[in-house]
Image: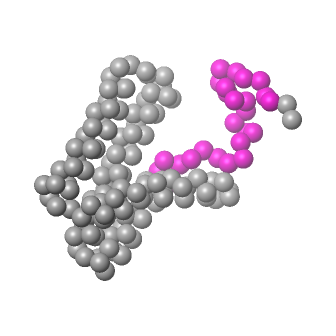
């Protein structure tokens, strides 16, 4: 099979050559919030502190994902590779680490619950990718 020629508009050939469609950021966000809600409800069986950790972790990652998508969209789609955008990405990362540290150390949020909540976004991304691959 011959590789399609590269053009400035389609560096890897035609978009129609792909098996799946474009990943939906909105659907990932919805999956993340649903997983966070379900995880919080399930976490209540263990303890309120664990459930609070799952809830806060999921909400922190939802906000983080939204900011990250906006920054990356600005950098890659609009071609704005200014140092401000790159700096904003690193400030976001440092802010996330600071917030997680404060939640665990100062507010005594359950660390395992928080990690479960933080990990929900990765499950949501995987779910979206699998659904796109099977054509849903």
> Mostly what secondary structure, the magenta segment?
loop
90 part of magenta stretch: no
Residue 43: x, y in percent? 32, 73
Q: Horizontal placement of 111 versus 80: left or right?
A: left
The residue under the point 36% across, 62% down is 116
| In-front residue for pair 113/2 | 113
The residue at 67%/26% (across/down) is 11
Left or right of 14 in this view: 69: left
**Residue 48: image x %, image y %?**
23, 74
- Do we see residue 42 in this rendering? yes
Q: Is residue 10 above or below residue 23?
A: above
Residue 136 location, quadrant: bottom right
104, 37: nearer the viewer: 104
Q: Name which quarter of the figure residue 69 lies in.
A: top left
Q: Which residues are magenta?
A: 3-27
Find residue 70 and report its image quarter: top left
On the image, the x and y values in percent for residue 95 come to 25, 40
Tell which residue pokes out farthest to the bottom in this image: 45
Q: Position of residue 32 (x, y in %)?
A: 42, 58
Q: Look at the image and tell me in which quarter the N terminus lies.
A: top right
Task: Name the residue furthest right.
Answer: 1
11 in magenta: yes
Residue 58 shows up from this direction: no
Residue at x 44%, y 33% (from the top left corner): 72
Query: Residue at the location (32% across, 32% down)?
Result: 90
On screen, residue 18 versus residue 125, left or right, reads: right
């Amino acid at each position: 099979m011959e590789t399609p020629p590269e053009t400035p508009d389609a560096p890897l050939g035609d978009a129609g050559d792909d098996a799946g469609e474009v990943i939906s950021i909105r659907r990932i966000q919805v999956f993340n919030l649903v997983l966070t809600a379900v995880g919080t409800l399930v976490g209540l069986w263990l303890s309120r502190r664990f459930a609070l950790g799952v809830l806060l972790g999921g909400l922190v990652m939802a906000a983080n994902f939204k900011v990250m998508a906006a920054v990356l969209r600005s950098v890659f789609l609009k071609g704005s590779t200014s140092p401000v955008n790159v700096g904003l990405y690193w400030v976001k990362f440092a802010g996330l680490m600071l917030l997680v540290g404060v939640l665990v150390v100062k507010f005594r949020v359950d660390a395992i619950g928080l990690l479960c909540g933080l990990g929900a976004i990765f499950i949501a991304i995987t779910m979206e990718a699998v659904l796109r691959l099977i054509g849903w």
